Amino acid sequence: MPIYLADTSIWAWASKRSRPDIREKLAERLERDEIATCAPIALEVMHRAETSDQYEELFSCLLAPLRWLETGGAATRRALAVQRELAGRSHGNHRRPAVDYIIAATGELAGAEVVTWFFDRDLRVICEHTSQLFEAETTTGPGH
């Protein structure tokens, strides 16, 4: 059974009325206990909370029940190694958000059953480079 490390981009698109397909897919995967998170994603998702009450409610309902993947020293070292590899391959290709490297490394090191799931071209470049499992949402919605 795959475990999906749902990037911040998935949570953001699932909250938009224009993407009921992502909302439904996320809900189905949550119901089957197939969604994981990690500290960098949680930090980004929770940045949207406007009050402490909203923060606590969102965290308790959305993130706390999930499977949490470890983002430690191994993940940060792997993130830096991948960035260096991309820098060596082409001029400027390494210029991706630092958090995306850490999220990708967290997913990669968590095991073969973890699929990094996103709507993010930077994560796509990183995951393609590492050859790790990923699922990329590729359109902005039906009809686009």
Image: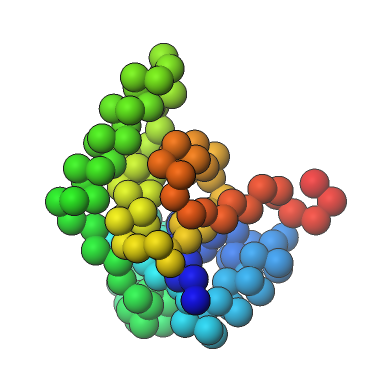
Is there any visible trace of residue 57 in the rendered image? no
Q: Is residue 84 above or below residue 24?
A: above
Going 66% across and 74% down the picture, which residue do you hit? 24
Direction bottom: furthest residue: 31
Q: Is residue 26 above or below residue 108?
A: below
Direction left: furthest residue: 73
Q: Is residue 140 above or below residue 42?
A: above
The x and y percentages for residue 19 are 69, 62
The x and y percentages for residue 89 are 40, 20
**In the image, 23: left or right of 122?**
right
**In the image, 50: left or right of 12?**
left
**In the image, 40: left or right of 9?**
left
Going 41% across and 41% down the picture, which residue do you hit? 130
The x and y percentages for residue 90 are 43, 17
Q: How is the image coloured?
A: rainbow
**Total marks drawn?**
0
Q: Quadrant of residue 85?
A: top left
Q: Nearer the viewer, residue 113 or 138?
A: 113
The x and y percentages for residue 113 are 43, 67
Is there any visible trace of residue 120 in the rendered image? yes
Going 38% across and 27% down the picture, which residue do you hit? 86
Direction top: furthest residue: 91
**In the image, 141: left or right of 41?**
right
Q: Quadrant of residue 28?
A: bottom right
Q: Quadrant of residue 25?
A: bottom right
Going 26% across and 35% down the picture, which residue do you hit? 81
Q: Nearer the viewer, residue 121 or 17?
A: 121
Direction right: furthest residue: 143
